[in-house]
Image: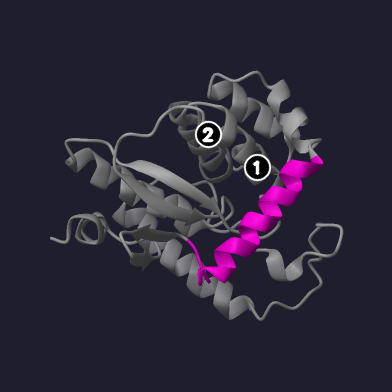
Protein backbone atom coordinates (compact mmCIF):
# COMPACT_ATOMS: atom_id res chain seq x y z
CA UNK A 1 0.00 0.00 0.00
CA UNK A 2 1.16 3.49 -0.70
CA UNK A 3 0.63 4.99 2.74
CA UNK A 4 2.61 4.20 5.86
CA UNK A 5 1.12 1.60 8.20
CA UNK A 6 1.47 2.54 11.86
CA UNK A 7 -1.19 0.63 13.77
CA UNK A 8 -1.59 -3.01 14.73
CA UNK A 9 -2.31 -5.30 11.79
CA UNK A 10 -4.27 -8.52 11.57
CA UNK A 11 -3.44 -10.84 8.69
CA UNK A 12 -6.61 -12.02 6.94
CA UNK A 13 -6.68 -14.69 4.24
CA UNK A 14 -9.90 -14.28 2.31
CA UNK A 15 -11.84 -14.99 -0.88
CA UNK A 16 -14.74 -12.71 -1.80
CA UNK A 17 -16.95 -15.65 -2.87
CA UNK A 18 -16.71 -17.24 0.58
CA UNK A 19 -19.84 -16.38 2.61
CA UNK A 20 -17.91 -17.08 5.80
CA UNK A 21 -15.34 -14.46 4.80
CA UNK A 22 -18.16 -11.93 4.55
CA UNK A 23 -19.60 -13.08 7.87
CA UNK A 24 -16.15 -13.14 9.44
CA UNK A 25 -15.79 -9.49 8.51
CA UNK A 26 -19.04 -8.77 10.34
CA UNK A 27 -17.49 -10.33 13.44
CA UNK A 28 -14.28 -8.37 12.90
CA UNK A 29 -16.25 -5.14 12.57
CA UNK A 30 -17.94 -5.87 15.91
CA UNK A 31 -14.58 -6.49 17.52
CA UNK A 32 -13.23 -3.29 15.95
CA UNK A 33 -16.08 -1.37 17.58
CA UNK A 34 -14.82 -2.56 20.99
CA UNK A 35 -11.27 -1.34 20.43
CA UNK A 36 -9.84 2.08 21.18
CA UNK A 37 -7.59 1.91 18.11
CA UNK A 38 -8.50 0.47 14.74
CA UNK A 39 -6.86 -2.77 13.70
CA UNK A 40 -5.64 -2.68 10.11
CA UNK A 41 -6.18 -5.65 7.80
CA UNK A 42 -3.13 -7.19 6.17
CA UNK A 43 -5.05 -8.73 3.26
CA UNK A 44 -3.93 -11.98 1.64
CA UNK A 45 -6.04 -13.32 -1.25
CA UNK A 46 -7.06 -16.98 -1.41
CA UNK A 47 -8.64 -18.94 -4.27
CA UNK A 48 -11.42 -21.31 -3.24
CA UNK A 49 -11.86 -22.29 -6.90
CA UNK A 50 -8.22 -23.31 -7.42
CA UNK A 51 -9.09 -26.99 -7.87
CA UNK A 52 -11.48 -26.18 -10.69
CA UNK A 53 -9.32 -23.79 -12.70
CA UNK A 54 -7.95 -24.80 -16.06
CA UNK A 55 -4.60 -23.66 -17.52
CA UNK A 56 -6.31 -20.53 -18.90
CA UNK A 57 -7.47 -19.52 -15.43
CA UNK A 58 -11.14 -20.08 -16.17
CA UNK A 59 -13.29 -22.22 -13.89
CA UNK A 60 -14.37 -25.64 -15.17
CA UNK A 61 -17.56 -26.33 -13.24
CA UNK A 62 -17.60 -29.94 -14.45
CA UNK A 63 -14.56 -30.79 -12.29
CA UNK A 64 -15.48 -32.82 -9.20
CA UNK A 65 -14.06 -31.06 -6.14
CA UNK A 66 -15.66 -33.47 -3.68
CA UNK A 67 -18.31 -30.99 -2.55
CA UNK A 68 -21.72 -32.60 -2.99
CA UNK A 69 -25.20 -31.28 -2.25
CA UNK A 70 -24.98 -32.44 1.37
CA UNK A 71 -21.85 -30.31 1.77
CA UNK A 72 -23.59 -27.24 0.37
CA UNK A 73 -26.72 -27.79 2.45
CA UNK A 74 -24.59 -27.91 5.59
CA UNK A 75 -22.82 -24.75 4.43
CA UNK A 76 -26.16 -23.02 3.91
CA UNK A 77 -27.29 -24.02 7.39
CA UNK A 78 -24.08 -22.59 8.87
CA UNK A 79 -24.49 -19.39 6.88
CA UNK A 80 -28.07 -18.97 8.10
CA UNK A 81 -26.98 -19.50 11.70
CA UNK A 82 -24.15 -16.97 11.49
CA UNK A 83 -26.23 -14.49 9.49
CA UNK A 84 -28.72 -14.45 12.36
CA UNK A 85 -25.96 -14.34 14.99
CA UNK A 86 -24.31 -11.31 13.39
CA UNK A 87 -27.55 -9.76 12.11
CA UNK A 88 -25.96 -9.62 8.66
CA UNK A 89 -27.80 -8.57 5.54
CA UNK A 90 -27.41 -11.20 2.80
CA UNK A 91 -29.05 -11.63 -0.60
CA UNK A 92 -27.77 -15.20 -1.02
CA UNK A 93 -26.22 -17.97 1.05
CA UNK A 94 -23.65 -19.36 -1.41
CA UNK A 95 -22.21 -18.13 -4.70
CA UNK A 96 -20.83 -21.20 -6.46
CA UNK A 97 -21.20 -19.72 -9.96
CA UNK A 98 -19.26 -16.52 -9.24
CA UNK A 99 -15.55 -16.19 -10.01
CA UNK A 100 -13.79 -13.83 -7.61
CA UNK A 101 -10.47 -13.79 -9.45
CA UNK A 102 -11.19 -10.52 -11.34
CA UNK A 103 -12.19 -8.84 -8.09
CA UNK A 104 -9.04 -10.07 -6.37
CA UNK A 105 -6.85 -8.82 -9.22
CA UNK A 106 -8.38 -5.35 -8.97
CA UNK A 107 -8.20 -5.46 -5.17
CA UNK A 108 -4.49 -6.30 -5.37
CA UNK A 109 -3.89 -3.30 -7.63
CA UNK A 110 -5.79 -0.98 -5.27
CA UNK A 111 -4.00 -2.50 -2.28
CA UNK A 112 -0.59 -1.82 -3.84
CA UNK A 113 -1.25 1.66 -5.22
CA UNK A 114 -3.77 3.42 -2.99
CA UNK A 115 -3.99 4.41 0.70
CA UNK A 116 -5.24 1.76 3.09
CA UNK A 117 -8.58 3.51 3.61
CA UNK A 118 -9.24 3.46 -0.14
CA UNK A 119 -8.43 -0.23 -0.42
CA UNK A 120 -10.64 -1.00 2.60
CA UNK A 121 -13.54 0.91 1.03
CA UNK A 122 -13.11 -1.04 -2.22
CA UNK A 123 -12.81 -4.33 -0.36
CA UNK A 124 -16.00 -3.66 1.58
CA UNK A 125 -17.79 -2.56 -1.60
CA UNK A 126 -16.94 -5.87 -3.30
CA UNK A 127 -18.27 -7.89 -0.36
CA UNK A 128 -21.43 -5.78 -0.34
CA UNK A 129 -21.92 -6.06 -4.09
CA UNK A 130 -21.91 -9.85 -3.90
CA UNK A 131 -23.49 -10.67 -0.55
CA UNK A 132 -25.84 -7.73 0.04
CA UNK A 133 -26.82 -6.80 -3.52
CA UNK A 134 -26.43 -10.25 -5.12
CA UNK A 135 -24.32 -8.98 -8.03
CA UNK A 136 -21.68 -10.89 -10.00
CA UNK A 137 -18.30 -9.56 -8.87
CA UNK A 138 -16.67 -11.28 -11.84
CA UNK A 139 -18.34 -8.61 -14.01
CA UNK A 140 -16.05 -5.63 -14.72
CA UNK A 141 -19.03 -3.26 -14.67
CA UNK A 142 -19.90 -4.37 -11.13
CA UNK A 143 -16.27 -3.87 -10.12
CA UNK A 144 -16.31 -0.41 -11.71
CA UNK A 145 -19.26 0.47 -9.48
CA UNK A 146 -17.27 -0.79 -6.49
CA UNK A 147 -14.33 1.36 -7.53
CA UNK A 148 -16.55 4.43 -7.77
CA UNK A 149 -18.02 3.65 -4.33
CA UNK A 150 -14.45 3.71 -2.98
CA UNK A 151 -13.74 7.06 -4.61
CA UNK A 152 -11.66 5.61 -7.45
CA UNK A 153 -11.77 6.23 -11.16
CA UNK A 154 -13.75 3.26 -12.55
CA UNK A 155 -11.18 2.95 -15.36
CA UNK A 156 -8.86 1.43 -12.75
CA UNK A 157 -10.76 -1.84 -13.21
CA UNK A 158 -10.00 -2.30 -16.90
CA UNK A 159 -6.41 -1.19 -16.35
CA UNK A 160 -5.92 -3.81 -13.64
CA UNK A 161 -7.65 -6.59 -15.55
CA UNK A 162 -5.52 -5.88 -18.64
CA UNK A 163 -2.29 -6.10 -16.62
CA UNK A 164 -0.82 -9.58 -17.13
CA UNK A 165 1.76 -9.00 -14.40
CA UNK A 166 -1.03 -8.44 -11.88
CA UNK A 167 -2.67 -11.71 -12.89
CA UNK A 168 0.64 -13.51 -12.40
CA UNK A 169 1.11 -11.90 -8.99
CA UNK A 170 -2.36 -12.85 -7.79
CA UNK A 171 -1.66 -16.46 -8.78
CA UNK A 172 1.64 -16.32 -6.90
CA UNK A 173 -0.20 -15.06 -3.82
CA UNK A 174 -2.77 -17.84 -4.12
CA UNK A 175 0.08 -20.36 -4.21
CA UNK A 176 1.90 -18.65 -1.34
CA UNK A 177 -1.17 -18.93 0.90
CA UNK A 178 -1.31 -22.69 0.39
CA UNK A 179 2.42 -23.04 0.95
CA UNK A 180 1.95 -21.24 4.25
CA UNK A 181 -0.55 -23.88 5.30
CA UNK A 182 -3.78 -22.00 4.68
CA UNK A 183 -6.38 -24.55 3.59
CA UNK A 184 -9.58 -22.61 4.13
CA UNK A 185 -10.93 -19.12 4.63
CA UNK A 186 -11.35 -16.88 6.38
CA UNK A 187 -8.13 -17.42 8.29
CA UNK A 188 -7.14 -14.74 10.80
CA UNK A 189 -3.47 -14.73 11.85
CA UNK A 190 -1.73 -12.67 14.52
CA UNK A 191 1.64 -13.05 16.23
CA UNK A 192 2.14 -16.67 15.24
CA UNK A 193 -1.40 -17.79 16.10
CA UNK A 194 -4.42 -18.27 13.85
CA UNK A 195 -8.19 -18.70 13.92
CA UNK A 196 -10.14 -20.12 11.00
CA UNK A 197 -13.76 -19.46 10.11
CA UNK A 198 -16.27 -16.73 10.88
CA UNK A 199 -15.27 -16.79 14.53
CA UNK A 200 -17.07 -14.56 17.06
CA UNK A 201 -15.62 -11.24 18.25
CA UNK A 202 -14.60 -12.78 21.59
CA UNK A 203 -12.37 -15.29 19.80
CA UNK A 204 -10.77 -12.52 17.76
CA UNK A 205 -10.13 -10.67 21.00
CA UNK A 206 -8.40 -13.73 22.48
CA UNK A 207 -6.34 -14.16 19.31
CA UNK A 208 -5.09 -10.57 19.39
CA UNK A 209 -5.13 -9.61 23.05
CA UNK A 210 -4.67 -13.03 24.62
CA UNK A 211 -7.63 -12.36 26.89
Vertical order, 146 against 69 (above or below): above
Q: Which residue is mark 2?
A: 125
Residue 103, numbered circle: 1
Residue 120 place in picture, x, y as percent? 46, 34
Looking at the picture, tell me which residue is in the foreground, 11 or 72.
Answer: 11
Q: Secondary structure at mark 1?
A: helix
Q: Position of residue 58 (x, y in %)?
A: 82, 57
Please indicate, yes or no, whether residue 15 appears anywhere in the rendered image.
yes
Position of the C terminus, as image quadrant, is bottom left
Q: Is residue 94 above or below residue 184?
A: above
Crowding near the residue tagged with mark 2, few <14, some 14–19, many ≥20 C-alpha atoms within 10 Å: many
Is residue 35 found inside the magenta-colored segment of the image? Answer: no
Taking depth in this image into account, of 12 and 137 the one nearest to the observer is 12
Q: Can you say whether 13 is above or below 119 in the image? A: below
Residue 181 percent location from the top left of the image: 51, 72
For residue 186, side relative to residue 161 (left or right): left
Residue in the image at 43% along x and 46% along y: 42
Look at 35% across and 50% down and name the residue there: 10
Magenta region, main secondary structure:
helix
The question of residue 178 being in magenta is answered with: yes
Amino acid sequence: MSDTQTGERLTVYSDYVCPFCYLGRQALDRYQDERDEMLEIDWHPFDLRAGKRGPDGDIDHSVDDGKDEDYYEQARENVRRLREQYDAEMAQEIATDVDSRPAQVVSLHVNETEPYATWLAFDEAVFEALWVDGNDIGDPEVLADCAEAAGLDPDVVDAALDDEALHARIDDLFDAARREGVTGVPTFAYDGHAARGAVPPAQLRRLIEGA
